[in-house]
Image (cartoon, rainbow, N blue to C red):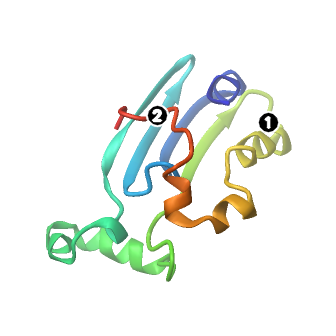
């Protein structure tokens, strides 16, 4: 899926949540044929409460605004510059990357059992 995304976009940036690595914020950046992905810390929901003191007030505020009772601050925020401006096609490609309702219902124990193409990368 990643090669298809790269060939469809000029540039991309943001952060994402991989179900197979639910504690790690993954930073994403692409430009041309190059992609950079790396660990950007823990989601606050995964951090120890004592570690919250080391988090900036802006991050705590942003997390609290979108906080979900189950997922906490986990989420995906990506921005892309598309080659031909076909948002429907790009949205479809990104939607293919999401968990299905059935997969989502498995919960964190089920997600971490999925094959992980990024195992050991972050």
Q: Percent position (x, y) of residue 30?
A: 51, 29
Q: Is residue 59 visible?
A: yes
Residue 85's disc is 1
Where residue 89 appears, x then y in whole percent?
Answer: 83, 39
Q: Residue furthest top?
A: 33
Front-most of residues 76 and 112? 112
Instruction: Count residues near mark 1 (Cα–Cα under 10 Å), then give few for <14, some for 14-19, many for 20+.
Output: few
For residue 46, what is the image quadrant?
A: bottom left
Q: Residues within 10 Å of mark 2 (few under 14, many from 20)?
A: few
Residue 33 on image: x %, y %: 56, 16
The one of 57 and 97 positioned closer to us in this rendering: 97
- Along the horizontal axis of the image, is 11 left or right of 64? right
Query: Horizontal placement of 2 versus 92: left or right?
Result: left
Q: Earlier in the sequence, mark 2 or mark 1?
A: 1
Position of 3 with respect to 67 (left or right) is right
> In x, y percent, where is residue 111?
55, 55
Q: Is residue 27 above or below residue 117?
A: below
Q: Specify the label residue 118 is tagged with.
A: 2
Query: Which residue is painted at 40% across and 72% down in the image?
Result: 62
Quadrant, the N terminus = top right
Q: Secondary structure at mark 1?
A: loop
Residue at disc 2, secondary structure: loop
Measure the C-alpha gap from mark 2 to mark 1. 29 Å
User: Which picture quadrant has residue 121?
Assistant: top left
On-image quarter of the C terminus:
top left
Q: Work out whether residue 75 can be spotted.
A: no
Kindly indicate whether the residue at mark 1 contacts the one at mark 2 (C-beta within 8 angstroms): no
């Amino acid at each position: 899926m990643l090669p298809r995304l790269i060939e469809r976009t000029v540039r991309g940036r943001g952060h994402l949540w991989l179900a197979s690595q639910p504690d790690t914020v993954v930073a994403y950046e692409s430009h041309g044929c190059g992609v950079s992905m790396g660990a950007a810390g823990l989601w606050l929901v995964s951090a120890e409460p004592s570690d919250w003191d080391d988090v900036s007030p802006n991050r705590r505020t942003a997390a609290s605004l979108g906080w979900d009772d189950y997922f906490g601050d986990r989420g995906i925020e990506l921005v892309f510059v598309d080659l031909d401006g076909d948002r429907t096609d790009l949205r479809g490609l990104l939607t293919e990357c999401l968990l299905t309702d059935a997969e989502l219902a498995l919960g964190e124990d089920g997600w971490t059992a999925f094959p992980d193409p990024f195992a050991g990368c972050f």
